[in-house]
Amino acid sequence: MSATRLAIIGAGAAGCFCAANIAENTREFDITIFESSDKPMHKLSLTGGGRCNITNTFDTVGALNHVYPRGANLLKKLFYNFDHNALQEWFLAHGVTLFAQDDGRVFPTSQNALQIVDTLYNALIAKGVTIKTNHRLSSLQTNAEGKFILSFDEKPPQTFDIVVVATGGTSPAFLDIFKKLGIETIEPVPSLFTFTIKDPDLNALMGATVDDASCSIAGTKFTSEGSVLVTHWGMSGPAILKLSSYAARYLKENKYTSNLIVNWLNTNEEDARNIVFSFQSRYPQKTVLSVRPDGITNRMWLYITNKCGIDGAKRWSEVSKKNLNRLVSILISDTYKIQGRGHYKEEFVTSGGISLNAVSSKSLESKAVKNLYFVGEVLDIDAVTGGFNLQSAWTTAYTAAMSIVNNQNKSN
Ligand SMILES: Cc1cc2nc3c(=O)[nH]c(=O)nc-3n(C[C@H](O)[C@H](O)[C@H](O)COP(=O)(O)OP(=O)(O)OC[C@H]3O[C@@H](n4cnc5c(N)ncnc54)[C@H](O)[C@@H]3O)c2cc1C
C-alpha cells in the first residue's frame, strides 16, 4: 500500500516542527513541506535579533491572557500536551541546550538562531521529509474522495490526503482560500508595534526611559505596565509593545489615532499627590529640579515640570497650588495623541487568521474540513514579546503532529 501523502504549507517554525514530530513518530507518511520563499525557516533565523528567543520560563507570568491577548484559553489546554519544559527536553534530545535569562526569556546556549534552524532542518532530512521551496500555495480544494488538490501558482496541481497549514501571519486574500471552504477567519491586523507621536518636546527626550510606568488607551480598558522608552518618533519599550498587543484590533479600527495616557509613576492620584505635596512641605528651600520622584531622571523631570509651566529653578515653597495640582495630573495621566504605528526592531506578529472556533481544541483539525489542520501564527493566537509567540508555534505544531500520528495508528 502506498504511504499517506501529507502536505505541510509553510516551512517556518510551526511547519517544520510539525513535520519533524510526525516523521520522528511514524513512517506511515510521505511528507512534503511547501515553502513560498527560497529559504526554509528564514524568519526563525532572524528571531530574537539572531539569538532566537525560543520560549519563556513562564515564571513571572501571572495569567496566560497577560501574555497571550488572543489564544490564552486554547493554549492553557494545549500546554498539557507540550509546554516550555517539553520544548526544552525536545531540543536537549536533539543536542541543543537552552538557558534562561533573569527576565524569563529562554535562548539556545549558543545564542545562535541558526543552531535551531539547522537542528530542525537536520531532523527533517534525517527522516526523509521533502522540502520544496518557491512553492506558494495559491489554491486548495477538496475532491469527491475528500482528498486535497493543491495548486502552487503556475505549477501543476498535486493531490494529498492530509494538509497542515503553517503559513504564519497572512493576508486576507490567502485566508479567502479557507473562507470558501466554510472555515471562519478573522481579519489579520498587526500587533507588537511602537507608537508614533509627533511632539517635538517629547521627541527631544529620545533615549529617556522610565522603568516603572503604566500606559492605557483613553476611553478603553486596555492598560499595561513596565518600562517606557521615549524615541525620536514617539514611544516604545515593553509597556508600549504590550499595550499595542492588547489593543491591536481596537487601534487598527481607530486608524492608530487614539489617545495614549502615560502614568509616569505607575501609581494612583492619592499617592502622586502625597509625593508632590510632601516635596513642598519637606523641602521648601530646595529647587524643584533638585528633588524629584524615584524613577524619574533629571531630563525627564525637567520635561515634566516644563510641561506644567513650573520653573525648575524656583524653590518648592514658591510653586503655586494650581501648579502642584497640574504636576500631579501630568505625572499620572500625561496624554498624547497617537499618530500612527512604528516598528519594533523589525519584530512584529499578526493578530487574527483562522478563528479558534473553526478548529478542534484537541487536534487543531478544521471542524469543517476533515484532515485539514492549522498550526502557528496562521491561527488567531498571538503574544507579547518574550518567546511566547514561538512557544505557541511549537505547541500548536506538536499538538497537530501527535493527533495526525495517533489517528494513523488507530486506523492501522
Ligand atoms: C524579526 C522577527 C523577530 C522575532 N523574534 C521572535 C522571538 O525571538 N521570539 C518569539 O517568540 N517570537 C519572535 N517573533 C515572532 C515569531 O517569529 C513568529 O510568531 C513565528 O515565526 C511564527 O511561526 P510560524 O511557523 O507560524 O510562521 P512563520 O515563521 O512566519 O512561517 C510561515 C512560513 O510560511 C511561508 N508561507 C507563507 N505563505 C505561504 C504560502 N501561501 N505558501 C507556502 N508557504 C507560505 C512563509 O514564507 C514562512 O516561511 C519574531 C518575529 C519577527 C518578524
Image: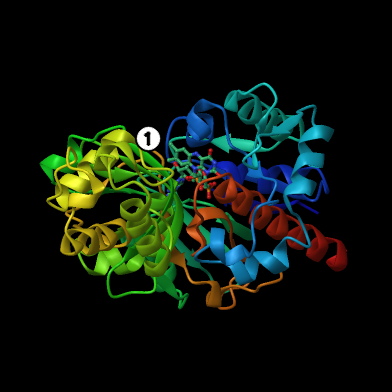
Report the number of discs. Answer: 1
Residue with the most extreme front position: 285
Q: In the image, is the residue at mark 1 within 8 Å of ligand 1 by its beta carbon? A: yes
**Left or right, residue 106 beside residue 132:** right
Circle 1: residue type: Lys
Instruction: Work out which quarter of the rendered image holds the N terminus and state it.
Output: bottom right
Examine the rendered structure and indicate whether residue 264 appears above or below residue 274: above
Front residue (pair 372, 113): 113
Residue for point 24% across, 57% down: 327
Examine the rendered structure and indicate whether residue 73 appears above or below residue 404: below
The percent coordinates of residue 311 (x first, y second) are: 14, 43
**Left or right, residue 258 beside residue 227:** left
The percent coordinates of residue 88 (x first, y second) are: 77, 40
Question: Is residue 116 visible in this depiction of the protein?
Answer: yes
Question: Is residue 138 visible in this depiction of the protein?
Answer: no
Helix, strand or loop at label 1? It is: loop
Residue under pointer 1: 345
Examine the rendered structure and indicate whether residue 242 appears above or below residue 103: below
The percent coordinates of residue 204 (x first, y second) are: 18, 34
Instruction: Work out which quarter of the rendered image holds the C terminus and state it.
Output: bottom right
Front residue (pair 137, 170): 170
Residue for point 29% across, 45% down: 235
Residue for point 43% across, 44% down: 294
**Left or right, residue 406 beside residue 64:** right
Q: Which colour scheme is used?
A: rainbow
Mark 1 nearby-residue class (10 Å; few <14, some 14–19, many ≥20): few
Residue for point 71% across, 64% down: 78
**Left or right, residue 98 beside residue 283:** right
